[in-house]
Image: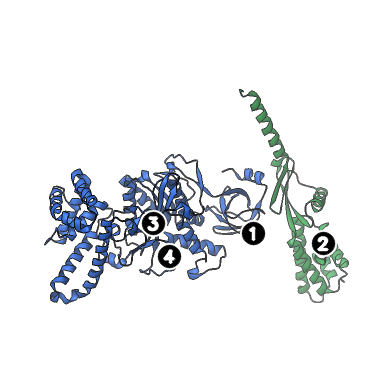
Chain colours: A blue, B green
Amino acid sequence: MKDFSSYLNEIEEIGYVEQVADAIIYATGLPNVKPEEIVIFETGDFGQVFSIEPELVEILIFSKNSIKPGTRLTRTNEILKVPVGVELLGKVIDSLGNSIESTKPSKSPTFTMPVNSLPQGITKRKAITKTLETGVLIVDMAIPLGHGQRELIVGDRKTGKTSFLTRTILNQTRHGNICVYAAIGKKKLDVKKIEEFFQKQGVMEKMVIVASGSEDATGLIHLTPYTAMTISEFFRDQGKDVLLVLDDLSTHAKFYRELSLLGRRFPGRNSYPSDIFYTHAKLMERAGNFITDKGEASITCLPVAETAQGDLSGYIETNLMSMTDGHLYFDKDLFYLGRRPAINPFLSVTRVGRQTQSNLRREINREIISFLNLYEKMQSFIHFGAELNENIRTTLLTGARIIQFFSQYTNEVVPINLQIVLFAMLWENSWENKELIAIREDMQRVILAYSSDKKIQQLVDTLVEQNDSFNKLLRMIKTQGPQILLSAQKYGNKT
Amino acid sequence: MNDKNKLIYEISNDIRTVAEADNFCSEIDVILENFYKVKNKNLEEVLLTSTGTSTSTLIKKILSDNKISLADNASCEKILVQTRDEIKKMKIVKITLAIDPSSEIISHISEWINQNLEANTLLDIDKDEEILGGAVISINGRYKDFSLRKSLAEVFTKKKNELIGSISPK
């Protein structure tokens, strides 16, 4: 960007700061200013036009520097753009595209894209047909997702939402997809931890972290998801499948509320402005499955919303639910029961994920959901104790095994074919009369064997590829299951 | 010409700059305060004791032009409040010069602006020696740099390009 004097001499329009209200600045002058245009102050700071009133221009400032009334400003005739490019991979950047790690020398991309672009039209979109593998058993098997889906991650704080997201990112980057993680108004320490985790896992080169700290300027925090979406759009245009995580939109809504109240907008429900739905929906609409010049490419968006005391009926949460293609609900009660991940399959929804499944996976999905429903009903009989009949006891035992099956260690990723085979083994009763802990240990061995032994991997993959129905697979598992377990015996416990 | 415009027209010859306007408005405030401080005091007395000669003359001129008697306190108060409000609404032309302008120069500039740019304006004059000469004017958000610095910079840039063009290999 040029400096203040250059823009002033070029555009020949001047304004004067009249009033400063934290992140919002009111200025007079600038007769031909346009909405969303970037303005530059004589102090070198710059901001974006938020709204235009007959006498005043409302400007959203992107820095924490104090700007005094009387300060001069001028137009730039430019809209807000951020640098995008493959150079961003492996970097942690702020909402304006500047690298946060000042110690590392970095090359900034030269190509820029507007932050507030319109969502693509219907002609550029395609139905969601590809499965998105999260590596999380309960999601991939019971509440499947597809590439291009927008799935809300909702739940109380500290219920394992971020853990699920990091696991999904890990799995997607290992599949060669690009991941963009937007940390909105987070603590710097949390952002650093996330960065270190991905670096340790060796996947940072496949992802970009767009971060704004809670101490940053409100304008910058507000901008974070839009910048992350713009970067995702760049990679989408390169023909890549992108996973975008917006962590979290409840915080974003709070900062937007702050800006709107400072901007004297009329407060609506919970003091949020009336355009909060539009603000988020416009952002969500930019994700999806698209037809690009380089073939089919998608932006899968996982926005996060934090609930208070498990209340799913909050304003922002319900807004987001209505603009996404489903939600995964992290239940604090399940979390306290020790379930990891604490996803409640009955309160979670996937609207487009099932259409991406193969016949075999769809059959398994149906079995799981109907069985979990039955198990949930049967649990009310638990207090009858010894009076339980054989059928109920078997159902309860299988239920406990399935729940145990869905429990995963933090950051443990299970490939989809292995998920199917393991579930088939469990369903077929390969671990008859075995304790839950022993089953768990066996599963760990198989997971380890799958990732280490090419033969086992091939066997598992062939089993899934050759069988298009669950019954056929179960018949095969009867003979192949013990063989897999036997081959996996030599792999130690991964606990 | 309506009453308000007439009022502004009357004072625009005497009040040309923001500093003069501020001074005049604060003197009006003092006069208005003094109306309440002493009972049965007339404006003649207030003008004599609490304002300067130039302000006093200007106020008397405004009152006589509007056919208001100095003894009619209510009408005097009304016209003074109206004058102050109209001054506060006047548009401001910011002008940067390389010198401290004399009163004559200020009058000259004010007259030129009222005739050529916009009538009934106040000048906000700033001094910046770095512009070398000429003036930088901003009015209604419009900014024009007529300074010598800019002209010289343009000449230097042009000459530099010519020079580079002449020595670079073809």
- Residue A42 in sight: no
Q: Work out how far the residue at label 3 is from the one at label 4, CA to CA, in angstroms.
A: 13 Å
In the image, A302 versus A422, the foreground residue is A422
Amino acid carrying label 4: it is Ser
Q: Which mark is residue B55?
A: 2
Of mark 1 and mark 3, the one earlier in the sequence is 1
In the image, A425 versus A86, the foreground residue is A425
Quadrant where the image shows the N terminus of chain A: top right
Which mark lies nearer to you, 2 or 3? 3
Instruction: Look at the numbered discs 2 and 1 and tell me whether their residues touch, using CB distance below 8 Å.
Output: no
| Residue located beneath label 1 in the image | A56
| Same chain check for tags 2 and 4 | no
Say few, some or many: other residues with alpha carbon within 10 Å of mark 4 (under 14 / 14 to 19 / 20 or more). Answer: some
| Same chain check for tags 3 and 4 | yes
Say few, some or many: other residues with alpha carbon within 10 Å of mark 3 (under 14 / 14 to 19 / 20 or more). Answer: many
Q: Work out how far the residue at label 1 is from the one at label 4, CA to CA, in angstroms.
A: 36 Å
Q: Work out how far the residue at label 2 is from the one at label 3, CA to CA, in angstroms.
A: 75 Å
Q: Work out how far the residue at label 2 is from the one at label 1, CA to CA, in angstroms.
A: 33 Å
Q: Work out how far the residue at label 2 is from the one at label 4, CA to CA, in angstroms.
A: 68 Å
Of mark 1 and mark 4, the one earlier in the sequence is 1
| Residue located beneath label 3 in the image | A149
Amino acid carrying label 1: it is Leu
Residue A259: x and y, percent? 52, 61
| Residue located beneath label 4 in the image | A322
In the image, A298 versus A243, the foreground residue is A298
